[in-house]
DNA sequence: ATCAGATGCAACTCCAGAGTTGCACATCGG
DNA sequence: CCGATGTGCAACTCTGGAGTTGCATCTGAT
C-alpha cells in the first residue's frame, strides 16, 4: 500500500485545494446536477462573473475533477468522479492509519502504567 | 440520507480548508507518528516559527482534527481521526452520487440517439 | 526566591488567489 | 456579409491567511 504511482501526493493536494473553496464546490454541485454545461451558463446561476467561473473551472480541471469538451464555439464542462473517489480512499486510509497508531500508543501507555504500578 | 445533523456542511468545510494547507498536513503527519506533542516540539521539526504552528493547530482544532490537553505548563496536541473519517465518508458518497447522475445522463443521451435514429 | 523554559497575545509584513473590467478573437444564424 | 453570442487574454484591485517579531505571563525546578 502507499504506492499509488508518481504524483499521487500532488494530485491529492490539488483536489483538496480545489475542494476548499465554497464557490468551486457549488460549481461541482451544478455540474453534477446538469451534466454538460458551459461556463457562461454556470455563471448565470452564481453571484460571480463568467471570468471568475472560468478560473475556478481551470482549477477544477487541473485537479482532474471536471472535464472540458469543445462543441462548436462553446466549451462544455462535466463532472469527473474518479479524482474525488481516489481522494476519498486516500482520506479513509489515512484515518485508518491514525486509528492504528492511536491504538498502539494507548497500548504502550497502559503497559507503562502497569509497569509503574508493579515497581512501587 | 444527506441527514447528518446540524452544521455538517460547515464541519466538512472546515476540514477541507484545514487539509488544503501543506504545513497543516505535515503537522498531522507528525502528530500521528508521535502521539501527544507540544507546539514547541512540533515547530522544531518544521521550517516555521512556533507561533505559526500554534495558529495551524488552532485551525486543526477548530476543524476537529486534533485535540488539546494541558499537562502542567505545556499543551499537548494529538490527532483525532473521527472528523477525517466523517469527511472521507462524505466525499465517497458525493462521488457515488456523481456516478449515479452520470449514468443517468448517459442513459438519457443514448435514448435520445436511438429516437433520432428511428425518426429518420 | 529566582531563573529558565513554555505558552499566550498583539501588531505587523507579505503575497497568493478571488474577483473584476475591458477588449480582442472566434463562430453561428440569418 | 454582418450582427449576435460565446470564449480567451491581460491588467488591475483587494482581502484573507500565512508567517514573523516582540513582549507579557505562567509554571516547574533548584
Image (tube, coloured by chain):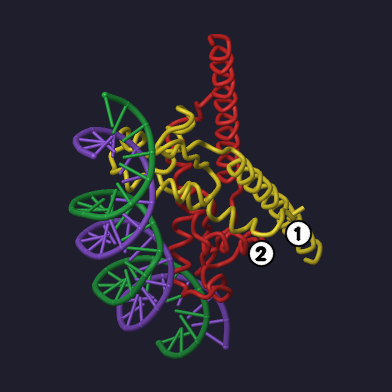
Chain colours: A yellow, B red, C green, D purple
Q: Is residue B97 above or below residue A115?
A: above
Q: Is residue A54 visible?
A: no
- B35 or D27, which is in the foreground? B35
- Residue B7, position in %: x, y? 43, 36
Task: Specify the label residue B34 is tagged with.
Answer: 2
Which residue is label 1 attached to?
A108
Quadrant occupied by the N terminus of chain B: top right
The location of residue A75, given as percent across then percent down, is 43, 40
Residue B43: assigned label: none
Task: Kindly identify the residue that appears in the image at 41 percent across and 48 percent down.
Answer: A56
Q: Which of the two discs, 1 and 2, sits closer to the camera?
A: 2
Image vertical order of residue A104 relative to residue C11, above or below: above
Left or right for A58, reference A5: left
Identify the element where label 1 is drawn.
Answer: helix
Mark 1 to mark 2: distance in Å? 12 Å
User: Residue A97 vs residue A25: left or right?
Assistant: right
Q: Residue at x 48, y 74 (%)?
A: B48
* Residue B61, horizontal then vertical, whole percent: 48, 54
The part of the image, by quadrant, that contains residue B31 is: bottom right
The answer to whether the residue labelled 1 contacts the one labelled 2, judged by CB atoms less than 8 Å apart, is: no
Badge 2, how many Cα within 10 Å: few under 14, some, many 20+? some
Closer to the camera in the image, B94 or B48: B94
Residue at x-position 45% and y-position 37%: A76
Instruction: Report the front residue among B60 and A65.
Output: A65
Q: Is residue C8 left or right of residue B50?
A: left
Q: Chain of mark 1?
A: A
Question: Would residue B33 be visible to someone looking at this image?
Answer: yes
Q: How many marks overall?
A: 2
Using a 10 Å C-alpha cutoff, classify the residue at mark 1 as few (fewer than 14 neighbours), some (14 to 19) or many (20 or more).
few
Front residue of this view, candidates B73 and A119: B73
Q: Tell me the chain of label 2.
A: B
Q: Residue B53 placed where, x, y %?
A: 48, 67
Amino acid at each position: 500500500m502507499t504506492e499509488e504511482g508518481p504524483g499521487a501526493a500532488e494530485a491529492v493536494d490539488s483536489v483538496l485545494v480545489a475542494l476548499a473553496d465554497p464557490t468551486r464546490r457549488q460549481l461541482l454541485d451544478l455540474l453534477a446536477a446538469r451534466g454538460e454545461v458551459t461556463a457562461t451558463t454556470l455563471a448565470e446561476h452564481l453571484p460571480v462573473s463568467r471570468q471568475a467561473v472560468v478560473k475556478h473551472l481551470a482549477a477544477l480541471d487541473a485537479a482532474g475533477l471536471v472535464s472540458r469538451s469543445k462543441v462548436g464555439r462553446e466549451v462544455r464542462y462535466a463532472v469527473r468522479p474518479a479524482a474525488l473517489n481516489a481522494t476519498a480512499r486516500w482520506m479513509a486510509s489515512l484515518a485508518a492509519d491514525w486509528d492504528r497508531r492511536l491504538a498502539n500508543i494507548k497500548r504502550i501507555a497502559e503497559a507503562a502504567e502497569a509497569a509503574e504500578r508493579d515497581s512501587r
